[in-house]
Image (cartoon, rainbow, N blue to C red):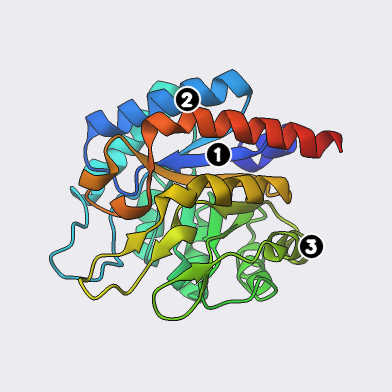
Amino acid sequence: MNIIEKIKDSDMFFLLAGPCVIEGEEMALKIAEHVSELTNRWGIPYVFKGSFKKANRSRLDSFTGIGDVKALEILAKVRKEFQIPVVTDVHSPEDAVLAAEYVDVLQIPAFLCRQTDLLVAAARTGRVVNVKKGQFLSPEAMRFAVEKVRESNNPDVMVTERGTTFGYQDLVVDYRGIKIMQQECHCPVVIDATHSLQQPNQACGVTGGQPALIETIAKAGIAVGADGLFIETHMDPPHAKSDGANMLRLDLMEGLLEKLVRIREAVRES
């Protein structure tokens, strides 16, 4: 049963969560264990997230990964040890073919959501495809990215809202987009509560963020009916090797999920 089928069998939102990038085996296993315990407690379908490499970096000296196969093998170990699906970003058709051997969900980064060759290659692997909405696209326009996946004979697709460019160095979330994409795309819609708070294009070449508002974004997303939630998390965000400025500290995950479960239950009963 893939994650799409699990979603249909659950009244709860599903969760994609993990570090921005795989920094090593110990950290990946620790995060997966902690979040698995929480999601099992509340019956939240869980997908462990970790990029096996980071291709879209502002500076040449930015950390990109520990090695493609090494990182993918760690994702496969998480998958086997905790019996949970795993998701990773892919940036090229070749990435899609390689990563599909190790993971359950292939994620298309927001900047690449219109790249036909990448979408088709991801679809043809037979894995679930999660397309992140471009910062430059309207919710209605995401229908065409979804159609590329479906027309490549893969019905297992979902989309993720991650904010829209607002000026040069900020993003804003339009929560109307969640309902619009559910209606236009006819697939699960995820709210990304961490990347939505990025502050890109900083003069220093390192993306900023507003992690204090993660709870605000997540609560609002679940309240308006998002099917899933995406959160990047780390034991020590200030020392993370990628996107530390907008990740949730791991020890805050429990309190946040408990609140979100209550909101989901309230929405379902209303």
- Is 184 drawn above or below residue 69 in the view shown? below
**Left or right of 268, for residue 195:** left
Mark drawn on residue 183: 3
Q: Earlier in the sequence, mark 3 or mark 2?
A: 2
Q: Quadrant of residue 103?
A: top left
Q: Quadrant of residue 180?
A: bottom right
Q: Are marks 3 and 2 in contact (CB under 8 Å)?
A: no
Residue type at mark 1: give it. Leu
Q: Position of residue 151 (x, y in %)?
A: 66, 67
Residue type at mark 3: give it. Gln
Q: Position of residue 269 (x, y in %)?
A: 85, 33
What's the CA distance linking mark 3 and mark 2?
Answer: 31 Å
Task: Classify the position of the C terminus by image quarter.
Answer: top right
Residue type at mark 2: give it. Ser
- Is 105 drawn above or below residue 41 in the view shown? below
Residue identified by numbered label 1? 15
Q: Residue furthest left?
A: 61
Mark drawn on residue 246: none
For label 2, the SS is helix
**Is disc 2 surrounded by few (<14), some (14 to 19) or many (20+) residues within 10 Å?**
many
**Left or right of 4, for residue 214:** left
Q: Position of residue 115 (x, y in %)?
A: 48, 75
For label 3, the SS is helix
**Is disc 3 surrounded by few (<14), some (14 to 19) or many (20+) residues within 10 Å?**
few
Name the foreground residue: 56 vs 201: 201
Q: Residue furthest front?
A: 212
What's the CA distance linking mark 2 and mark 1?
Answer: 10 Å
Q: Earlier in the sequence, mark 2 or mark 1?
A: 1
Residue identified by numbered label 2? 36
For the point 72% across and 64% down, the residue is 176
For the point 12% across and 65% down, the residue is 61
Q: Earlier in the sequence, mark 3 or mark 1?
A: 1
